[in-house]
Amino acid sequence: MRRRTFMGGISAAGITACLSEKAFCGDKKFLLKKQDVILFQGDSITDAGRQKKDPIANQGLGRGYPNVIAESLRKDHASLDLQIHNRGISGNKVPDLDRRWQADCLDIEPRVLSILIGVNDIWHALNGRYDGTAETYRDGFAALLARTRKALPNTTIVVCEPFVLMSGTVKKNEGDWFPEFDVRRKFAKEAADSAKTVWVPFQSMFDEAVAAGTQPSALAGDGVHPTAEGHKLMAETWRSVVGV
């Protein structure tokens, strides 16, 4: 994606947002190589209905941002035969990632690893199905990133900012979500910085889209799970920040 095109505005099925260059454009181009492995990890936002039985690269990647990214990358870099995987699982929290990390991440040995995790760590706590605190999330995520950095020293790790929008269940229960959700976003950024990862500011991206006039429900009906338009916006921002 050319910087000029991106900075002219992001358009996703009628949604347009002017995004700041500093926050949403990478400092330099990331050079993809032949048969590079790219892995997306996370919860239902990443899962998005992906194929879970015998998953393989480039197939059954779901209907969300990983598939949008994969389709555009493989089109733009057709000669590279990129190997793109989606191993997100609906409902996952940081401890769930940790339990399956060897098989679903380290053994895959990605050159680029993208992680979006955090909304269930608070949502399940609000629903009484999980007793983890913000500090549990902070410490667990930091440990997971440190473990990954040690096992895969040459992998580019991308941490995506957890986000919610003021729509659906989030708007209805705003007092339960905030200010704790902002604390968890802060902890995610601290963990990402400590592990020297690439940071994709999804919350900031959505906030700017809403400030520019887009209705939150057009981006995520329930405030958590993106619409098709929301996923497209995420994909465009991810590519620009990562520099691919």
Image (tube, grey):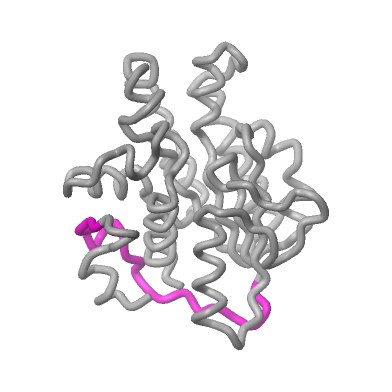
Displayed quadrant of residue 178: top left
Is residue 126 part of the magenta span, yes or no? no
* x, y percent for residue 141: 57, 37
Q: Residue furthest top?
A: 128
Residue 153 vertical position relative to residue 173 in the rendered view, above or below: below
Quadrant into which the N terminus falls: bottom left
Q: Residue furthest bottom?
A: 79
* x, y percent for residue 156: 56, 63
* x, y percent for residue 72: 49, 72
Is residue 22 part of the magenta span, yes or no? yes
* SS assignment for the magenta stretch, majority: loop
Image point (23%, 68%), residue name: 7
In the picture, measured across the screen, residue 205 lies left or right of residue 90, that is left
- Residue range highlighted in magenta: 16-36
Image point (37%, 60%), residue name: 237
Q: Residue furthest right?
A: 54
